[in-house]
Amino acid sequence: MLLGNCKEKIKNVSTAFANAEAECPNRISIYVKAVVLYHLSHAVQMNGCQNHCKLMKTETTAFNPKLYIGIDVHKKSWTFHYQTDLFDGKTITQPANPNTLVEWVQKHYPAHEVTCAYEAGFSGYSAARLFQKQNWNVLVLNAADIPRPQKQSVVKTDKIDCRNICKQLKNEALKSITIPEEQRESFRSLFRERNNFVMGLRHIKLNIKSYLMYCGITIPEEFDNASWSKNFIEWIKNQRNEYETGSLKISYLLKRYEFMYQESLSVSNQIRLYARKHYKKDYYLLMSVPGIGGITASAILAELGDLRKYNRFDDLASSVGFVPGLYSSGDTTIVKGITPRAKSLLRSYLIEASWQAVRFDPVLQEYYRSHYGKQPNKIIVKVARKLLSRIHAVIKTETPYQIGVIK
């Protein structure tokens, strides 16, 4: 039967199968059927006639084994727990070096698809970027977003923490924060350093005024404000203490003030220069918005990057922190005010910009007046959210801001 034409073989085998089933319909076994089908398939394959029986062709699908790693990161050591898609693993402590973990995985689970997670903190994103180069799936977690059982608030160890992260990772219960590009992360670090200088300058100003009051020296009314002029600095220099050490104290305070002032001025200029060079288009679009100056525009670009990545404004508002806290249970609903989860530095810049925007944009001014009767600091937060939505629209449409436009 195997020496004839392919089609004839198929016909003959099919006929044999039909005859056998007709003779003993109640007794033909599954085994006999399987043997007949095997010979039918074999006959086709031996004669190169696979195209005549496509329905009998089988395909194999590759299966990638998975490895999940939850890491508890510390300065001197890392503790991690691992699981595969089939079984639970062990908890291991290693030196605080991501390369050590990579070598361990390559040695023990080289063919696995690796997914790992660790809490965001002092260690930054360098480990995440190294893991990504190994084609791992990496999640950097906000510690507040990790589900934890109540008993973990009573008993907390590195072993328990990493086991919990690994378990939640395997259950797909974790969501990563955004891992910024290295270039933007560096820009953001410089911008935040500027804020340190600004806070330091504010602190030294308070120290100088406090010491003058301590010595019984009254500051003239024209100088008693937040803006320090050159005349005020000269007035302070001319103040003489009865004792030499008192005069030296004022002298050193003024030197610290001069240093902080010059450094904050220098870093501000460098930040604006960098933003104009690397984010030129978006920088000038942002500058068209009332209340947004060079530093605030740089803050938006440093903290958020390209606003086009936010398809929904609600996602952008949530990222900045312009969403309310809410408690609702049954018939009880309590609005708690804006969430503490925010980019607090950027949010403060936008609120400050809103005070300027309501002076120049009649639509925002009208929106502010529509909430008259509420506390001004609460109204301005609403204005800041609306201003942020307009900033988002300016970047998405790449159209400069138009004062007085309602929508």
Image: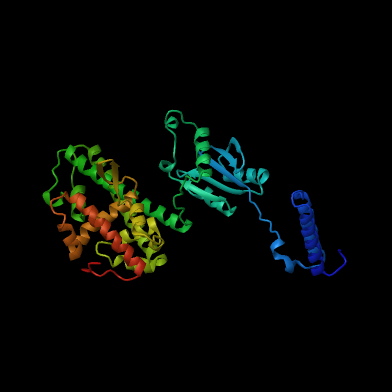
51 or 333: which is nearer to us? 51
Q: Is residue 130 visible?
A: no
Which quadrant would residue 103 be assigned to in this image?
A: top right
Which residue in the rendered view is the most extreme toward the front? 23
Q: Position of residue 326 (x, y in %)?
A: 29, 45
Q: Position of residue 370 (x, y in %)?
A: 15, 57
Q: Position of residue 162 (x, y in %)?
A: 52, 37
In this picture, is 310 found above or below 114?
A: below
Q: Is residue 37 left or right of residue 145?
A: right
Which residue in the rendered view is the most extreme toward the right? 3
Which residue in the rendered view is the most extreme toward the top? 154
Residue at 63 percent across and 45 percent down: it is 105
Colour approach in the figure:
rainbow
Which quadrant would residue 21 be assigned to in this image?
A: bottom right
In this picture, is 51 found above or below 168?
A: below
Q: Quadrant of the C terminus?
A: bottom left
Q: Is residue 318 left or right of residue 237?
A: right
403 or 295: which is nearer to us? 403
Q: Quadrant of the N terminus?
A: bottom right
Residue at 20 percent across and 62 percent down: it is 364
Residue at 35 percent across and 66 percent down: it is 395
155 or 16: which is nearer to us? 16
Q: Position of residue 387 (x, y in %)?
A: 26, 60
Q: Is residue 103 visible?
A: yes
Residue at 27 percent across and 65 percent down: it is 289
